Amino acid sequence: MSLVPESADAPMEERVLDAALAELAVRSVADFRMSAVAARAGVDERTLLQWWPNSNELLAAALMAFGARHLRVPDTGTLYGDLLAYAKGWAVMVDSPLGRRLLDAVIVRPQDWDLSDARRPFLARRGRRMAEIVARGVERGECRADVDPAKLIDLIAFGICLPVLFYDRYVTADDCEYVVNLVVHGVRPR
């Protein structure tokens, strides 16, 4: 399933997806409405309905675009540098109002939104992206070949998200460095 319609005009699509994210930043997932996104983007709601048949698909497309834009695959030349850059990008995201709303929607109250259509493509893309980082680390001798890229990034993501979820505090650069140091130490060749 493609989350972005082929018939969408690129600048208008970007405007709509940005409007959807802005709407999510101020509303709960349960209160997310296509009519509000259309008004914020300055387009007719019927146009949105031609591209996305319901608010869940629009929201899923917006989240995929957000992830692609803000959680890029770094290539710093070292496994440590790549993972630290990824962790810091993740921290910036979860420290934002939108990031906190997403954590609430996806982790704390997932029953408010059916993620089944968005989860599979998101996880597949994330897996491919993390596999690139791990493969480069293996090639440079910085990482064991048996390391599971998905589990590696899960450890980093959970380490970054826990201060936000459990302690309601912002993630610091020291938090990112601590988590990445632990993970990199654990995946080094023996």
Image (tube, grey):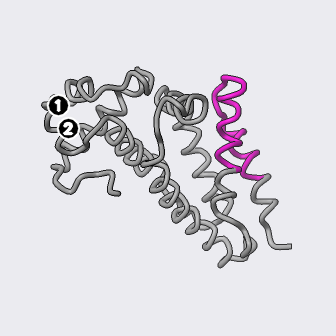
Queried whether the magenta region covers residue 113, the answer comes back as no
Q: In which quarter of the image is the N terminus?
A: bottom left
Compare residues 37 and 144 and report the one nearer the observer.
37
Kindly report the distance in space between the C-alpha atoms of the residues bearing marks 1 and 2: 5 Å
Q: Which amino acid does label 2 sit on?
A: Leu
Which residue position is annotated with label 2? Answer: 48
Identify the residue at image location x=64%, y=56%: 83
- Region rendered in magenta: 155-181
For mark 1, give the secondary structure.
helix
Q: Residue at x 59, y 44 (%)?
A: 88
Residue 164 placement: quadrant? top right
Q: Residue 161, image x and y in percent?
A: 65, 37
Q: Which amino acid does label 1 sit on?
A: Glu
Going 72% across and 24% down the picture, which residue do you hit?
Answer: 167
Eyeballing the image, is 22 above or below 130?
Answer: above
> Which residue does the numbered mark 1 point to in the structure image?
45
Magenta segment main secondary structure: helix
User: Which residue, as the protein is rendered here, is positioned at the far right?
Assistant: 190
Q: Position of residue 156 (x, y in %)?
A: 68, 49
Q: In what quadrant of the picture does the C terminus appear?
A: bottom right
Residue 153, quarter of picture: bottom right
Report x, y in % for residue 150: 63, 59
Is the residue 36 above or below the residue 107 in the image?
above
Q: Report x, y in % for residue 123.
A: 52, 55
Q: In this view, does 53 lie above or below 72?
A: above
Please, what secondary structure does the residue beneath circle 2 have? Answer: helix
179 to the left or right of 170: right
Q: Is residue 167 magenta-colored?
A: yes
- Assess whether mark 2 and mark 1 are in contact (beta carbons under 8 angstroms): yes
